[in-house]
Amino acid sequence: MTNNVPRRQLLKFLGMSILGTSFSSCITSPARAASVNWGYIGKAGPEHWDELSPEFQLCGIGRQQTPIDLQVADVKNVTNHDLLSVNYQPTALHLINNGKTVQVNYQAGSYLKFGQQQFELIQFHFHHFSEHRLNGKSYDMELHLVHRSPNGNLAVVAVFLEAGKFNPTLQIIWDAIPQQQGLETRIEDINIDVSRFLPAKHSFFAYTGSLTTPPCSENVLWCVMETPIEASIAQIAQFSQTFPLNARPLQPLNDRLVMEFI
Ligand SMILES: [Zn+2]
């Protein structure tokens, strides 16, 4: 199964990611916390999230927080081509401008498998600039594909976006971003296929982290794709006009293990 990481260590890592934790509060925050006006600058910014609500405590005291700087020198390499697999289907375009990002809600039937555990794709959304860094390098944007297992665990696949070629799939979303916040727009005659956002090369980093927005719940399995995809400068500018900054600053790695699957 593995080449250069002790099997015991890998199992420990996998065990960390499948420990049961309820994430009911992550996607839909509790009523009280949901009304808290958090943001990315000033008194509502990331340095103050933990002061805004008792339910946001982990944003300040959590030891497994996301995002992190992925330093290749720190990671353990594992050759395993079968650990992560996806089965994504096209979905009708249901999207929402929630005031923090544009989120595409995915219909049932698309899955990610990590080891033996299956997670259903429930939504994806975007950050500007990237939240993770790779060897200290920040990217223009970062896409998060959020999945949930039947017992409520979360797994997020992150894909960096960098300036380059025009991205037709991205433009379908950009053209449909609702200006009005908080209402889901349903465009049933436009299909979107999230698999078009995956880079051709599937090597990725995996570690146990958190949501990057309040309540910063932990025990989230993160799979950060190593190879970025491209979007044009104009497309990146179009997103950043609506969302100038929606990236949480880097968090300490602490004693976590980061693995690179190639
Ligand atoms: Zn995100």
Image: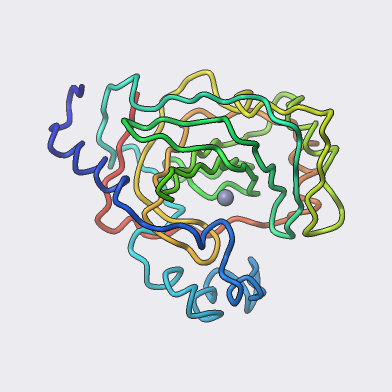
* Left or right of 168 in this view: 7: left
| Quadrant location, the C terminus | top left
Residue 157, image x and y in percent? 49, 38
Instruction: Count up the numbered dots.
Output: 0
| Quadrant location, the N terminus | top left
Q: Foreground residue, 9 or 106?
A: 106
* Left or right of 84 in this view: 258: left
Residue 112, image x and y in percent? 46, 31
Q: Foreground residue, 106 or 137?
A: 106
Q: Foreground residue, 206 or 104?
A: 104
Q: Is 5 placed above or below 101 here? A: above
Residue 125, image x and y in percent? 64, 45
Q: Residue at x 44, y 55 (%)?
A: 66
Quadrant of the rendered image containing residue 78: top left
* Left or right of 245 in this view: 97: right
Q: Residue at x 26, y 46 (%)?
A: 257
Q: How is the image coloured?
A: rainbow
Q: Foreground residue, 13 or 31?
A: 31
Residue 57, image x and y in percent? 44, 75
Q: Residue at x 49, y 59 (%)?
A: 24
Q: Residue at x 50, y 42 (%)?
A: 147
